[in-house]
Image (cartoon, rainbow, N blue to C red):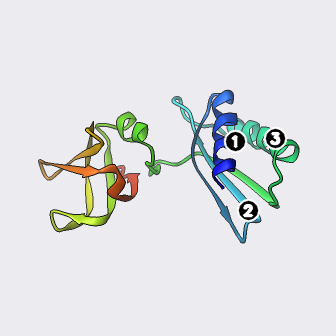
Amino acid sequence: MQDLHALLERSLTQLGYELVDFEMANRGKLLRLFIDKPEGVTIDDCVLVSNQISNLLAVEHDIDYDRLEVSSPGLDRILKKPSDFERFSGERAQVKLRVPVENRKNFIGILRGLESGNLLIECEEELHSIALSNIDKARLAPEF
């Protein structure tokens, strides 16, 4: 899986896209990619990436899948890498922890960047510092 991640990330970067996440579902028969780029993802982007990745996997990697799906990460985009937390500083996010901090496992607030390997998130006008290694799941939480 790690080799596939590296292959996908390298290929998408060369095309000008970011690999946000990928998953194998339906007992490995569905390969789902979530891509992004600064100006947003269009259907044409998804078609281009789908064609390129299909060809790449057919030639360079022996992955047994029946269907490939490519889409944007959506408004509630998942946040995984340190660069995600920096890029979306100032945005509202929901963060779930592995181990409670200050007797809490769930934080919803404004991302305030990174400091010494910790995520800074402002909730109810209070700034919290959370180790990136303690984050179980994080995603943007836009308000409508």
Across and down, in percent, residue 28 comes to: 73, 66
Of the two numbered discs 2 and 1 on the same chain, state the one appearing first in sequence: 1
Report whether 76 appears left or right of 42.
left
| Residue drawn at 54 percent across, 48 percent down | 73
Across and down, in percent, residue 139 comes to: 40, 53
Of the two numbered discs 3 and 2 on the same chain, state the one appearing first in sequence: 2
Proximity of marks 3 and 1: CB atoms separated by less than 8 Å:
yes
Nearer the observer, 143 or 2: 2
- Farthest residue to the left: give it: 125
Of the two numbered discs 3 and 1 on the same chain, state the one appearing first in sequence: 1
| Residue drawn at 56 percent across, 33 percent down | 37
Residue to which mark 2 is pinned: 30
Q: Amino acid at mark 2?
A: Leu
Q: Is residue 107 above or below residue 72?
A: below
Q: Amino acid at mark 3?
A: Leu
Question: Which of the labelled discs sits on residue 7, or is there none?
Answer: 1
Within 10 angstroms of label 1, few (less than 14), some, or many (20 or more) residues?
some
Mark 3 or mark 1: which is in front? Answer: 1
Q: Amino acid at mark 1?
A: Leu
Within 10 angstroms of label 2, few (less than 14), some, or many (20 or more) residues?
some
- Farthest residue to the right: give it: 59
